[in-house]
Image (cartoon, rainbow, N blue to C red):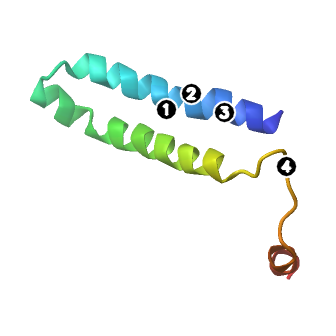
Amino acid sequence: MCMENNYMSNSLAYNEYLTRFELLSSGDIETIINLGPAIKFNGGGHINHTIFWQNLSANGGKPSDELTKAAEK
């Protein structure tokens, strides 16, 4: 449930905002510059979540013994 909420509230929102920014800018350089901070935030969030989802183990999975020992320290 937590992962589903994360995906629905964060990952999709970052993509939605980036799409809105693209529509808002419509090639106007001043608008693009003004949207810079929001584009960085949402673009960064999109990239971070993409990396996060790609690094999850399929069907759960068990960490290696080495990783488990390091986490237990």
Numbered disc in front, either 1 or 4 = 4
Image mark for residue 60 = 4
Look at the numbered discs 3 and 2 and tell me whether their residues touch, using CB distance below 8 Å. yes
Q: In which quarter of the image is the C terminus?
A: bottom right
Query: Above or below — where is 18 with respect to 48?
Result: above
Q: Residues within 10 Å of mark 4 (few under 14, many from 20)?
A: few
Q: Is mark 1 on a helix, strand or loop?
A: helix
Which badge, 4 or 2, is on the more N-terminal residue? 2
Q: Quadrant of the N terminus?
A: top right
Q: Mark 3 points at which residue?
A: 7
Look at the numbered discs 1 and 2 and tell me whether their residues touch, using CB distance below 8 Å. yes
Is 19 on the left or on the right of 70, as rendered? left
Q: Mark 2 points at which residue?
A: 12
**Residue occupying image coordinates x 34% and y 37%:** 39
Q: Mark 1 points at which residue?
A: 14
Question: Label 3 sits on what residue type?
Answer: Tyr
**What x and y, as percent, mark residue 66?**
82, 80
Residues at marks 1 and 4, CA–CA distance in whole angstroms: 25 Å
Q: How crowded is mark 2: few (under 14 residues within 10 Å), some or many (20 or more)?
A: few
